[in-house]
């Protein structure tokens, strides 16, 4: 008899193999997923550990360097931990929410209060700029022309500094000045002594002065003459004075009497000359005058109203006039007295000066260039008195 063999069907074997394959595929997927998850967890752990590792950062506060060791990740956390506060106008080179990295350098510039006065208003502002010029420029203040800033634009900003912007405006105006004519007496040999006639009528001149007015913040601060021009030339009045001797009438008396009179006349003339000599009489420019004293080797300089700060009003209250006004030491030449200066003529002591002491005299000229060209000279002066001598 043969052995009974259980019948193995083909379908049973096929089903077993299919189950085995499916199990292997599922198991591989599970293992792959588990591996991926493990790697992700490891990366997260590494990132966390890296984030919690110690970092070194540098903070520069108003130029002072501070180095910190920290495990914080945000800049705001570091500042809070180090008790570093920021004011609204302070500047920082990084954002507070930025993550910090090892070796980062953060710069903090503190805003400083500054009192600014400009255009009639005073206000306190906070700035991080280094100089006054940068600070006012950031505020939108524009400087024009001759505007001034105190202190200067390149001055470093300090806390509570007071800064003032002064607006400068210039205006040029014209001023008319009358020029009085002089009265000049001249000797006329065609006229007899005692006869006077007007040879030329005098006419005053007119000068136009260009005056620059300077205003600071709308208020007049100073003014100066920047130019002048003669609109009408002065015409001096000339008076002719006769010097021709009068005819001597023929004597009627006897010769002896005539001789006596002639002798008497000569004696009187001689006596008159002696008297004149004893009274310090001098004859200059056709004028005989008595003088109080003579000062030799007087140091002469010149000045002009065109110089800054001089003006046109003298110390005695008169207006400076070329050809008349001189500055003197009142202890040497009294104010208001007339003098005769060799080579220059008659002048009147009307002004003084800080440098005019002793035997020194300053001659006034309208033109600054003429005054400068005068230089320094040495002359003899005859001190006359309060009345100007007239032509003989």
Image (spheres, rainbow, N blue to C red):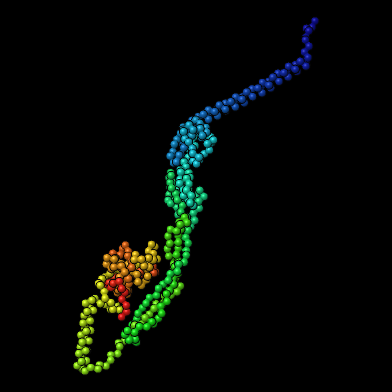
- In the rendering, at what x and y percent does residue 207 appear? 44, 71
What residue is drawn where x is 39% and y is 69%?
Answer: 367
Q: Nearer the viewer, residue 268 or 273?
A: 268
Residue 369 seen anywhere in this rendered image of the structure: no
Q: Where the N terminus falls, by quadrant?
A: top right
Side of 118 where 183 appears, left or right:
left
Where 73 sits versus 317, above or below? above
Position above or below: 278 against 39: below
The image quadrant that residue 342 belongs to is bottom left
Residue 172 pos. (x, y %)? 47, 63
Please determine whether, in this image, residue 193 is positioned above or below residue 150: below
Q: Nearer the viewer, residue 281 or 166?
A: 281
Q: Is residue 76 something that shows in the picture?
A: yes
Q: Farthest residue to the top: give it.
A: 1
Residue 265 in picture, x, y percent from top left: 22, 86
Q: Position of residue 76 (x, y in %)?
A: 51, 34
Question: In this image, 383 relative to 141: left or right?
Answer: left
Give the side of residue 227 with respect to residue 35, left or right: left
| Residue at the image point whose x is 45% and y is 43% from the top | 112
Residue at x 47% of width, y 48% of height: 122
The residue under the point 49% across, 54% down is 143
Identify the residue at the far right of this view: 1
Quarter of the C terminus within the rendering: bottom left
């Amino acid at each position: 008899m043969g052995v009974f063999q259980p019948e193995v069907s083909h379908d049973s074997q096929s089903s077993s193999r299919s189950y085995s394959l499916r199990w292997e595929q599922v198991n591989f997927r599970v293992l792959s997923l588990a591996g991926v998850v493990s790697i992700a967890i490891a990366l997260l752990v590494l990132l966390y550990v890296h984030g919690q590792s110690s970092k070194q950062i540098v903070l520069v506060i108003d130029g002072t360097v501070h180095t910190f060791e920290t495990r914080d990740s945000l800049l705001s956390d570091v500042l809070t931990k180090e008790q570093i506060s920021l004011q609204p106008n302070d500047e920082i080179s990084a954002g507070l929410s930025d993550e910090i990295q090892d070796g980062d350098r953060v710069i903090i510039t503190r805003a400083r209060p500054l009192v600014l006065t400009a255009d009639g208003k005073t206000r306190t502002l906070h700035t991080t700029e280094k100089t006054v010029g940068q600070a006012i420029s950031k505020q939108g203040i524009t400087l024009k022309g001759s505007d001034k800033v105190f202190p200067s634009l390149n001055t470093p900003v300090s806390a509570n500094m007071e800064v003032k912007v002064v607006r400068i405006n210039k205006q040029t105006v014209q001023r008319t000045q009358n020029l009085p004519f002089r009265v000049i007496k001249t000797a006329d040999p065609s006229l007899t002594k005692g006869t006077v006639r007007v040879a030329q009528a005098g006419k005053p001149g007119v000068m136009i002065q260009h005056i620059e007015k300077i205003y600071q913040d709308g208020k007049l601060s100073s003014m100066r003459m920047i130019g002048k021009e003669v609109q009408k030339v002065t015409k001096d009045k000339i008076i002719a004075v006769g010097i021709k001797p009068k005819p001597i009438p023929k004597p009627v008396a006897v010769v002896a009497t005539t001789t006596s009179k002639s002798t008497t006349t000569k004696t009187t003339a001689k006596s008159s000359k002696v008297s004149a000599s004893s009274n310090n009489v001098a004859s200059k420019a056709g004028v005989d005058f008595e003088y109080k004293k003579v000062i030799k080797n007087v140091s002469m300089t010149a000045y002009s109203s065109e110089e800054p700060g001089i003006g046109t009003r003298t110390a005695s209250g008169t207006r400076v006039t070329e050809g008349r006004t001189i500055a003197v030491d009142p202890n040497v030449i009294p104010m208001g007295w007339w003098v005769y200066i060799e080579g220059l003529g008659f002048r009147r002591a009307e002004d003084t000066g800080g440098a005019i002491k002793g035997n020194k005299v300053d001659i006034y000229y309208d033109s600054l260039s003429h005054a400068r060209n005068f230089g320094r000279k040495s002359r003899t002066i005859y001190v006359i008195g309060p009345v100007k001598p007239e032509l003989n």
